Amino acid sequence: MNYLKDLAADIEGWKQAGRYRSIKVWESGSDTWMNLNGRRILQMSSNNYLGLTHHPKLKEAAINAIDKYGVGSGSVRTITGTLDIHEELEMELAKFKGTEAALVFQSGFTTNQGALSSILGADDVVISDELNHASIIDGIRLTKASRKIFAHKDMDQLEAVLKETQHYRKRVVVTDGVFSMDGDIAPLPDIVQLAEAYDAIVYVDDAHASGVLGKNGKGSTDHFGLHGRVHIQIGTLSKAIGAVGGYVAGAQLLKEHLIHTARPFLFSTSQPPAVAAACLAAIQVLQESESLVTQLWDNANGFRAALKQLGFDTGASETPIIPIIIGDPAQTMRFSDRLLEEGIFAQGIVYPTVAMDKGRVRLIVTAQHKQDDLAFALSSLQKVGREFGLIS
């Protein structure tokens, strides 16, 4: 069987539908302005919310860790791969999140896979928001638990599901803290209240809330003042923190259970020491000052308001994730390509990541964007938006 023929047919179909996207190869590190094919491009799609990838304290910590430990940890965590820098990072994360303990994984994606597949069994049910991240969806698929989906942020439907699932041993309500495609915030206080009324566990993925929401970027639980009422907090070290990795923050018993059951933790080599040290330095930078988080929100709120004033449809955005909703997949990709011609990278996102008629260019504003950068972006967006008939 020539399986490559089938793959080629798939790819050709994506091209014909205007959904094919080649990977851009950047010639400089993650920053506000980056080099692409010899051109200087304004980056408007990076998850580097606080600009920490180039922070001197993170770079110094990573270099010192290489000098002390070398470039790798040499093993999985349960054999010889737990170094003191890993334990120090987890202690600092738990303190930062206000929990008993934290456990670090290799990525945010594997964190959800490991945690959900470990805590959910055949006698349990998981109740998930319909717009939750793909890592949550895949983590749920790895379990034998029953599955229920509630409409996006629909608390009436969530309550109805909680009522009809009383017979399960354990019920886990799962939600993103900030939804990655629309930039809206979960109604976490309402979710917690319902979960408490019906004796359910609350599981929040703060990938896009880590370093963004809450005091010093502590996340959505802190943002809403719900410490002690959210059972499982998932965080990322790959976005605002500036490096790579993910973690679970919660009870010490949860950590001990995951150490023995979470397959991505058990069967993957631990973080390189330089990564763990950089993440530790990032948490320390956040704890020292709120200035970066404040600047992030000032930039995001001002930019979103300006886009709306121009007439762009920014959907439900209320965070630094600001989509411009276009609709048709091919039109969305053409809009993204046209912005690149103007010197702006704004990634087009289409089906199957979002609904077929909800294609959008997803903009992400960071703390590092200067007012001149944002003014340039607005001017180019206005020009291209008029060409495409998106604004008058």
Image (cartoon, grey):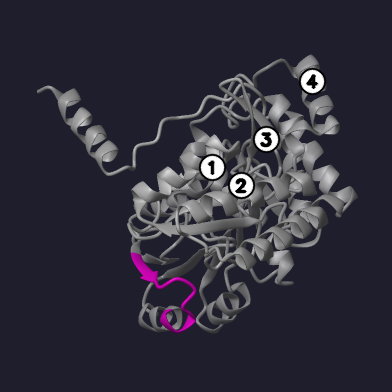
Q: Give the labeled residue for mark 1.
A: 339
Residue occupied by mark 2: 380
| Amino acid type, residue under disc 2 in the picture | Ser
Residue 194 among those drawn in magenta: no
Q: Could you say where residue 170 lies in the image, as x and y percent from the top left?
A: 44, 69
Question: Hey, what amino acid is under mark 1?
Answer: Leu
Give the number of marks. Answer: 4
The dot on residue 243 is: 3
Question: CA separation, marks 1 and 2?
Answer: 7 Å
Q: Are marks 4 and 1 in contact (CB under 8 Å)?
A: no
Residue 184 in the image: x percent, y percent?
Answer: 57, 65
Q: Pointer 1 and pointer 2: residues touching (CB < 8 Å)?
A: yes
- Looking at the rendering, in which quadrant would you find the N terminus? top left
Q: Quadrant of residue 250?
A: bottom right
- Which of 150 and 99 lies nearest the eye of the viewer? 150
Decide: is 347 above or below 66: below
- Nearer the observer, disc 2 or disc 3? 2
Of the two numbered discs 2 and 4 in the rendering, the one whose residue sits closer to the viewer: 2
Q: Do labels 4 and 3 touch, CB within 8 Å?
A: no
Mark 4 / mark 3, whichever is N-terminal: 4
Residue at disc 2, secondary structure: helix
Q: Residue at x 22, y 30 (%)?
A: 7
* Label 2 to label 4: alpha-carbon separation: 39 Å
Q: Is residue 76 visible?
A: yes
Between the residue at mark 4 and the residue at mark 1, the CA separation in whole angstroms equals 37 Å
Q: Earlier in the sequence, mark 3 or mark 1?
A: 3
How packed mark 1 is, by other alpha carbons closer than 10 Å (few <14, some 14-19, many 20 or more), is: many
The answer to whether residue 279 is above or below residue 182 is above
Local SS, label 3: loop
Is residue 152 inside the magenta stretch?
yes
Span highlighted in magenta in the image: 147-157
- Label annotation for residue 63: 4
